[in-house]
Amino acid sequence: MRKIFWPLSFLLLNLTFAAHAVPLKRVSIAEFEQLLSEVKGQPEAKVAKLVSGLELTERASAVRLARWESEFPGRHSQDAFTVLADSSAFYDLPAGETPATAPPDTEAQKAILGKSIDYVQTTINRLPDFYATRKTENYQDMLGRPGSFNRSSGQTSLAGLDPKVIPHEPLLDAGKSSLMVRYVDGREILGTKKNDRSVGDPSNTLTTHGEFGPILVAILDEAVKNKIYWGHWEQGTAGAIAVFRYWVQLGQSSYQVMIPQINRSEKVFPAYHGEIGIDPATGAILRITVVADFAPPNQQAASSILVEYGTVAIGGKSFICPVHGVALARFAVPDALGPVNRIDPVVATRFRTELNDVAFVEYHQFRGESRILVDNPIDTPEPPAPPK
């Protein structure tokens, strides 16, 4: 079985500004837009502070996000909008944005899933060899950074540490990077980062891969073998999207997550659930989400992926490929603070949250090209005749 690889690591940052915890308020889309109307025309800093202290209870569509960004064009407010919308990517759309179309009957549902299975098994394998650029904006909270331990004064162990009472910290811009990804013979090959503006070591931050095919192959295969059922209709840019929900149990998961430990990382394969959005006419997968269900002792962890697929041009032809992605993770990060003695070092815990907003752009086909150079002498006038 092909694995979904999501290696996860944590970037240690230099603490250059003070932590500023804000109360987190959960609001609906309608409530949020009412709050926006009240701060229209206000300084950007006030708008960004408002947005960063909120969490949506419903999914914000790309259309809504574009409208918010056009109404509040400041960079800080737009970063806050991106974090807010991406964090809501794993929720349901507002009720008013879901078509009231009746669900397909059982046979029609089976037909849609059958087309999707055929799509994954055939169409993806027929993709040409190509390369594309993965542009990532990384956001991190303050609580995961050195000097910001989630423990009371004098606390010297994990005893009494309750993740549920950790104050909310806004996710702040931690840098951008571009990475060339090659897709050759059905395999995804990661290149080196270019134009990197990450804070600290750019190789040690939240990363994902498998979006160009392996994630679809593995999830659809495991969903069909475990549990997959009808969800709802959604309205896409080119028509209706059939959304199925699925669940993959522990022991049958190929979703790999690396959980940080002191001086090492622990590889786990958690149970997971999510949604698969399918074009009912072609079986093409247009949207997929993965939400990990961690077992103890990692039950406080969070790890979620969204990939949206769209039509891109490669070598003059149209193909369905990744166009946008979101990766969201939260883990307890232990730190050895001692050793207080050589046998029993003191351990404190930071809770780290990271979010990646990813755009897949600049698709190009690998193509062998050759040119035949032909001498093309320039006509020159004949030399004059010698004198007689």
Image (cartoon, rainbow, N blue to C red):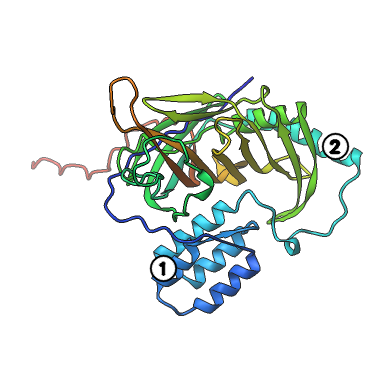
Secondary structure of the residue carrying tag 2 is helix
Local crowd size for mark 1, using a 10 Å CA cut-off: few (<14), some (14–19), many (≥20): some
- Which of these two is toward me, 334 or 286? 334
Q: Amino acid at mark 2?
A: Ala
Residue 316 appears in view: no
Q: Quadrant of residue 220?
A: top right
Check the picture and name the quadrant holding the N terminus.
top right
Q: Position of residue 218 (x, y in %)?
A: 65, 28
Q: Is residue 292 left or right of residue 368?
A: right
Q: Position of residue 222 (x, y in %)?
A: 71, 27
Q: Is residue 266 left or right of residue 215?
A: left
Local crowd size for mark 2, using a 10 Å CA cut-off: few (<14), some (14–19), many (≥20): some
Label placed on residue 24 = none
- Residue that numbered label 1 is attached to: 74
- Residue that numbered label 2 is attached to: 111
User: Distance from label 1 to label 2 (Cα)?
Assistant: 47 Å
Secondary structure of the residue carrying tag 1 is loop
Q: Nearer the viewer, mark 1 or mark 2?
A: 1
43 is higher (above) or lower (below) than 209: below
Q: Amino acid at mark 1?
A: Gly
